[in-house]
Amino acid sequence: MNIRLTNGKKTITRAKDQYEANIKHFKMRGFVPVGEVKKEIKKATSKDISDKIVQLKPKRKKNVKKTKKKN
């Protein structure tokens, strides 16, 4: 029988007897069975989203005539 383990980013599948023999090893690396993981659901408001927007600087325009003369 297999057991699915996750550390938040990665999900792996191992044999249940292998997991039980090496529980400390998997806990040390941050892996826990998928059913034990509680997902936090956070609703984002428009204010939170607008605070995280970064305005990009406009690209600098190159002078085509000068670049052609250099070559």
Image (cartoon, grey):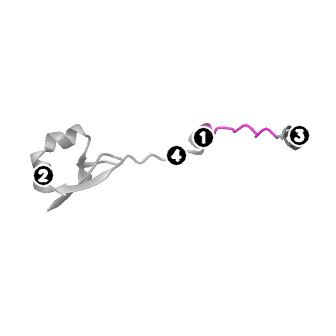
Say which of marks 3 and 1 sits in front.
3
Give the residue number, with chain letter if any, for mark 4. Answer: 44
- Residue type at mark 1? Lys
Provide the secondary structure element on which disc 1 rests.
helix
| Residue name at image x 61 percent, y 37 percent | 51
Q: Which of the marked residues, 3 or 1, is nearer the chain's N terminus?
A: 1
Q: Position of residue 37 (x, y in %)?
A: 28, 48
Q: CA distance from mark 4 to mark 3?
A: 53 Å
Pointer 3 with pointer 1, Cβ within 8 A: no
Q: CA distance from mark 2 to mark 1?
A: 47 Å
CA neighbours of label 2 inside 10 A, class few (<14), some (14 to 19), many (20+): few
Q: Position of residue 31 (x, y in %)?
A: 25, 45
Quadrant in the rendering for residue 15: bottom left
Give the residue number, with chain letter if any, for mark 3. Answer: 69
Provide the secondary structure element on which disc 2 rests.
helix
- Magenta-colored span: 50-61
Q: CA distance from mark 3 to mark 1?
A: 50 Å
- Residue type at mark 3? Lys
Give the residue number, with chain letter if any, for mark 1. Answer: 47
Give the residue number, with chain letter if any, for mark 2. Answer: 18
Q: Which of the marked residues, 4 or 3, is nearer the chain's N terminus?
A: 4
Provide the secondary structure element on which disc 3 rests.
helix
Does residue 58 sit above or below 19 in this rendering?
above
